Amino acid sequence: MGKWLERKTNWLKNDNYDGGFKEKTAGRPPNDSEDYGVKFIPLRCPRCKSKNVLCYKTDFPIRYHTCQSCGWKFKSIEEK
Ligand SMILES: [Zn+2]
């Protein structure tokens, strides 16, 4: 009768490999960088301070807005 080969678990190192692999890829990747949540600063009309402004034209990086409250037209420039 032949001798059973010693049955090793993890003989291909699959367990460890899988575990490490899953840990790295499963679920949401860790994200503690600053772009995970950023501040949103609503535009305000420079004249009446209303937040009810509409962007009617974008000419990057300049956006043109019109205030829905007082009709004032102004532009914003996107900063890098
Ligand atoms: Zn206004």
Image (cartoon, helix red, strand yellow):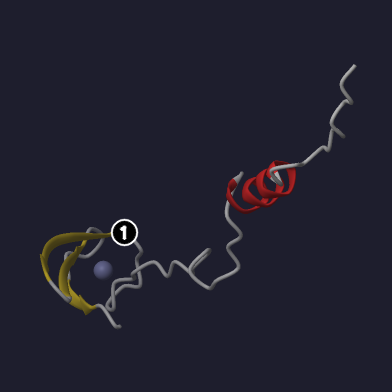
Q: Is residue 10 above or below residue 70?
A: above
Q: Is residue 68 above or below residue 63?
A: above
Q: Which residue lies most toward the bottom here?
A: 80
Query: Image check: 47 left or right of 12?
Result: left
Q: Which residue sits at x=61%, y=44%? A: 26
Q: Which residue sits at x=64%, y=45%? A: 22
Badge 1, how many Cα within 10 Å: few under 14, some, many 20+? some
In the foreground, 33 or 78: 33
The amino acid type of the residue labelled 1 equals Asn
Query: Image check: 55 left or right of 6?
Result: left
Q: Is residue 1 above or below residue 45?
A: above
Image quadrant of residue 77? bottom left
The quarter in which the C terminus is drawn is bottom left
Image quadrant of residue 42? bottom left
The x and y percentages for residue 46 are 29, 78
Query: Image check: 48 left or right of 31?
Result: left
Q: Is mark 1 within 8 Å of ligand 1?
A: yes
Q: Quadrant of ligand 1?
A: bottom left
In the foreground, 58 or 37: 37
Q: Which residue lies most toward the front here?
A: 1
Q: Is residue 8 above or below residue 19?
A: above
Can you identify the residue that label 1 sits on?
52
The x and y percentages for residue 13 are 71, 47
The quarter in which the N terminus is drawn is top right
Label 1 element class: loop
Q: Which residue lies most toward the top here?
A: 1
